[in-house]
Image (cartoon, rainbow, N blue to C red):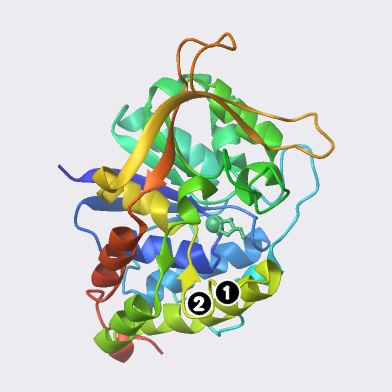
Amino acid sequence: MVERVIIDTDPGVDDLAAIYLAIASPELQVEALTTVYGNIEVDTSTRNALSLLELAGRTDIPVYRGASKPLVRQAYFAKHIHGNNGFGGVEAPNPTISEEKTSAALEIVRRCNETPNEITIIALGPVTNVALALSIDPSLAEKVKRIIVMGGAVRVSGNFSPVASFNLASDPEAARMMYESGVPIVQVGLDVCTKVRISKENLDHIREAGNRPGAFLLEAAEFRRKAYVKVQQSSATETGVFFNDVPAVAYALWPELFDEQPAFVSIETKGELTAGQTVAEFTGQWGHSEPNSSVLMGVDGQSVAKQFANRIATLEDTRSKIK
Ligand code: RIB
Ligand code: CA
């Protein structure tokens, strides 16, 4: 059965990769993109959402602009990883399509009320839009089929702080609202994202396919790859790249490639050094006998990377259509 999805996103090089995987996959019906600040300002993420759809020939997918800042904190951007324009400095064509007039949060509420329990939200940025939607309509928690969220770091280091991931630490109060709402959550955190390395062979496969959206992704990815080498001081990414948002979409497609464990996840909001941490109880011994999340803790990273490249290779070559 085809899964209906709204992708909440801050594109972002790895959002670009993840959205292209979704668009290339007949198992998913991408019904809307909702944008949020995160890697860059929401003005840029909204423009990028429109551009990436244009590049892929999917101007039929509507884009709704969302939050420009966290619920109570200052926004923190990740331009050192994604470039000032979010696409690693690579110029995207000017979009010929426009964003819709409704806000992201209102549109999430409207669509999920229209067809309860049918829409999955794949959240690839700070979860402010989700929290706003839940505060507009708390019954939304029973109307969303599930939220697959890229965020969290349980047994590995964070990428915002030693213990917290960028997306959840960007707006810990929003993340806490989401985890406490009762909505079914699949947490696709750094525990698995750091194990899905898109290798040189995978990238070459995309290059050989030669389609326009794939070529754009490869160009943008090069900035990210170099940025990772710099911040991690590691040779692990010298011939490959990590797209943290890809495993969230990959889970929707191939859950059998992941090891998932039920857990009760709480979000730290008070800690000076730990805000946004995902505190995961797997055993129930700390007072929570019922899980609120399914936490991904293992992955067949090579298979995900291979399937990802195979799918990107099938995207339409829109070269003749893009001005
Ligand atoms: O740099 C961290 C960010 O990159 C996160 O937003 C993640 O979703 C990816 O886009
Ligand atoms: Ca993202």
Q: Position of residue 17 (x, y in %)?
A: 42, 67
Distance Cα–Cα, label 1 vs label 2: 5 Å
Q: In the displayed structure, does residue 291 sit left or right of residue 145?
A: right
Q: Which mark is residue 221?
A: 2
Which residue is painted at 28% across and 60% down in the image?
A: 303
For residue 120, above or below residue 177: below
Per the image, the residue denoted by label 1 is: 224
Which residue is painted at 65% across and 54% down in the image?
A: 159
In this view of the protein, which residue sits in the foreground, 4 or 193? 193
Three-letter code for the amino acid on which mark 2 is drawn: Ala
Quadrant location, the C terminus: bottom left
The reply to whether dot 1 and dot 2 touch (C-beta < 8 Å) is yes
For residue 192, above or below residue 219: above
Q: Is residue 19 visible in this depiction of the protein?
A: yes
Q: Residue furthest left?
A: 1
Q: Is residue 136 visible in this depiction of the protein?
A: no
In this view of the protein, which residue sits in the foreground, 97 or 191? 191
Three-letter code for the amino acid on which mark 1 is drawn: Arg
Q: In the displayed structure, does residue 251 sit left or right of residue 271?
A: left
For residue 81, above or below residue 6: below
Q: Residues within 10 Å of mark 2 (few under 14, many from 20)?
A: many
> Circle 2 sits in a helix, a strand or a loop, which is it?
helix
